[in-house]
């Protein structure tokens, strides 16, 4: 059959690359040169998963196309998130201004003199002995 890389072996078997290396080290799976024979994968893991882009993955990876595409997507995501953060900061400022406007409209928080001298205010001790 065909020789595949360790990464491709992981994709075909449905295992991770670390598992492939671990099974090679333990002797469960044997390697051929710098890869693994697909017949060996079938012997150890059974039927292989159909992956039609395994060879294309290696070609693109060598060119760096996948890396550039991923980085480009991350940069777009970062730009979108920065816009969201800026919008939230603007909304916060608007709400803070609205709260301040309402605070100015409310009467002051100091109690009126009639409430201040009310005998019902104060501790129980003061109410009993009326100092």
Image: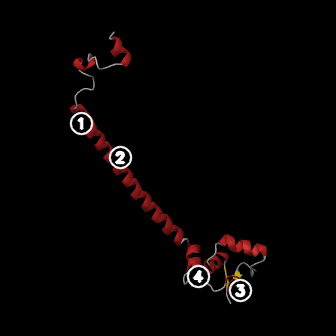
* Between marks 4 and 3 in the image, the one whose residue lies nearer the viewer: 3
State how far apart marks 4 and 3 are (Cα): 22 Å
Residue 64 in the image: x percent, y percent? 55, 71
Earlier along the polypeptide chain: callout 4 or callout 2? 4
Q: Is residue 113 above or below residue 67?
A: above
Q: Is disc 2 placed on a helix, strand or loop?
A: helix
Q: Which residue is mark 2?
A: 89
Look at mark 3 in the image and give the residue it sits on.
Answer: 43
Residue 123, position in %: x, y? 37, 19
Residue 93 in which image quadrant: top left
Mark closer to the observer (1, 4)? 1
* Residue 6 coordinates in the image, percent (x, y): 67, 76
The colour scheme applied to this rendered structure is secondary structure
- Alpha carbon of mark 4 to alpha carbon of mark 2: how far? 47 Å
Image side of residue 58 versus residue 88, left or right? right
Residue 12 lies in quadrant: bottom right
**Residue 30 spot, x, y in % from top left:** 76, 80
- Spatial distance from mark 3 to mark 1, Cα to Cα? 75 Å
Instruction: Return the residue at label 1.
Output: 102
Closer to the chain start, of discs 1 and 4, is 4
Res. 47 image quadrant = bottom right
Q: Which mark is residue 51?
A: none
Report the quarter where the C terminus lies.
top left
Q: Which residue is mark 4?
A: 55
- Mark 4 lies on a secondary structure that is helix
Q: Secondary structure at mark 3?
A: helix
Residue sitting nearer the eye, 73 or 129: 129
Q: Which label sits in the foreground, 2 or 3?
A: 3
Question: CA separation, marks 2 and 3?
Answer: 59 Å
């Amino acid at each position: 059959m065909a020789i595949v890389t360790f990464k491709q072996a992981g994709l075909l078997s449905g295992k991770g690359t670390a598992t492939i290396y671990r099974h090679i080290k333990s002797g469960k799976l044997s390697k051929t040169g710098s890869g693994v024979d697909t017949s060996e994968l079938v012997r150890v893991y059974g039927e292989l998963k159909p992956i039609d882009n395994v060879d294309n993955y290696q070609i693109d990876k060598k060119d760096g196309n996948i890396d550039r595409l991923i980085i480009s997507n991350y940069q777009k995501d970062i730009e979108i998130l920065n816009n969201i953060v800026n919008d939230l900061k603007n909304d916060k400022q608007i709400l803070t201004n609205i709260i301040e406007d309402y605070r100015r409209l409310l009467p002051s928080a100091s109690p009126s003199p009639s409430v201040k001298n009310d005998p019902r205010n104060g501790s129980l001790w003061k109410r009993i002995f009326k100092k």
